[in-house]
Image (cartoon, coloured by chain):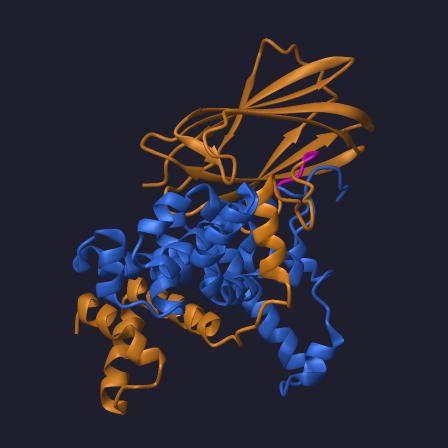
Amino acid sequence: MNCTEFSEQVTALTAGAMPEASRDEYLAHAKVCAGCDAALRGRRATLAMERLPVEQPPAGLFERIATDVTRSRPQRGTSRSFWTGAAFGGAVAASLLAIVLMLGVFELPADQPQTVAAFYVSADEPRMMHVAIEVDRALPGAEISILLTGNVEVQGFGSRRELNWSDNLDAGINKLSLPLIASGEGGGQMVVRLSHPDSEQLFVIDLPLDS
Amino acid sequence: MSEHDSAKSRFTSLVQEHFSALYGAARRLTSSPSDAEDLVQDVCLKAFESIDELERIEFRRAWLLKVLYHKFVDRRREISRSPVDQADTGADSFEPEQIARSEIRPDEQLDQDARIAQITRAMGILNKDDCSLLALHDIEGYSLDELQQLTGLNTGTIKSRLYRTRSKLGRLLSSEALQQPILKVVGGKE
């Protein structure tokens, strides 16, 4: 049994179309092979999707869409509110590492960035970096910027190197979750800039590639 | 016949016979009929913009489904930027009559819905081409030979990519973030 054979038969395995003896042999291989074990889970997932009931489109939907798209810009049925504040949510594989930025409310000058931590990124999957920002009083309307260097991206933002938003920071700990993924060799760095009418502070987080 | 009527007629002749398959695929991937309609509308817009190419394509349905899975990944990435993950809340997906029709108990239905939501979230993280290749083969039932003709890749490459993508999907489904509900972001005091 090798991975190629397993790959060839994974559909038969998940569909129950395999003799019991062979099935046991394949499952035994998956127990000792992480790649094939993951492939088996992946195939079970696609099988679950395949087996979902197929719904028919509502009457008149094709006619309406055909009219829209061939006439002009289509009118969307719904509109989505994309990222409007400091929000990153959703579908990301996680590697949990909390980096706590202990702030005495920006008492350091902005031209002296601090390297606070390192977070290992992967090219295989996005990893969630949790940054805890602690401030000793509420900071309404704080400006937050993320600047990326090197071969690291915020998942879902492609090659964008800078992201900015404003938000109200509460006194105490505020959490920022960033899904990061390596886009090439060498990793990179992230500069977090926090600014408020009173002051500004920079923090640098090293983002080495997890080899 | 007006210019619009002519364009619509041409579009209809190419797309209408595949529309049910497109909608069915979209509905599997989305938590609500309105999201599915948005998704197929995106596909139809792309089809209309590429109508000359579409006319020349032999495997028209596969081409349309491939576009659909690409658009699905795009949309999942957009949703992942939103403060509210609608797939998690299910706020617009509750349909009592659908549950009543189902033979599955409501608690089992919820488990299945959660499982499907996890799978679609994980699929949305995949590379677009990998996602569409895997979906066309594993979900839509296209053979390796058909995929070879559609993509121009040899079957060895297709098999290898299917294996890698299934493995990645399996790893994503095991990862912690996909087991959790909406991630909390800036502003919350802990």
Asked whether B22 or A1 is in front, the reply is B22
The residue lying at 66 percent from left, 85 percent from top is B105
| Residue A190 seen in render | yes
Q: Which chain is blue?
A: B
Quick check: A67 left or right of B120?
Answer: right
Asked whether A66 or A130 is in front, the reply is A66
**The residue stretch that appears in magenta:** A84-88
Asked if the stretch drawn in magenta spans residue A169, the answer is no
Q: In this view, does A62 lie above or below B103?
A: above
Q: Is residue B178 above or below residue A54?
A: above
Q: Quadrant of the N terminus of chain A?
A: bottom left
Instruction: Kindly report the secondary structure that dominates the magenta region of the rendered protein.
Output: loop
The spot of residue A113 in percent (x, y) is 56, 16
Asked whether B87 or A148 is in front, the reply is B87
Q: In this view, does A158 lie above or below B98?
A: above
The spot of residue B1 in percent (x, y) is 54, 47
Q: Find chain A in the image and tell me its colour.
A: orange
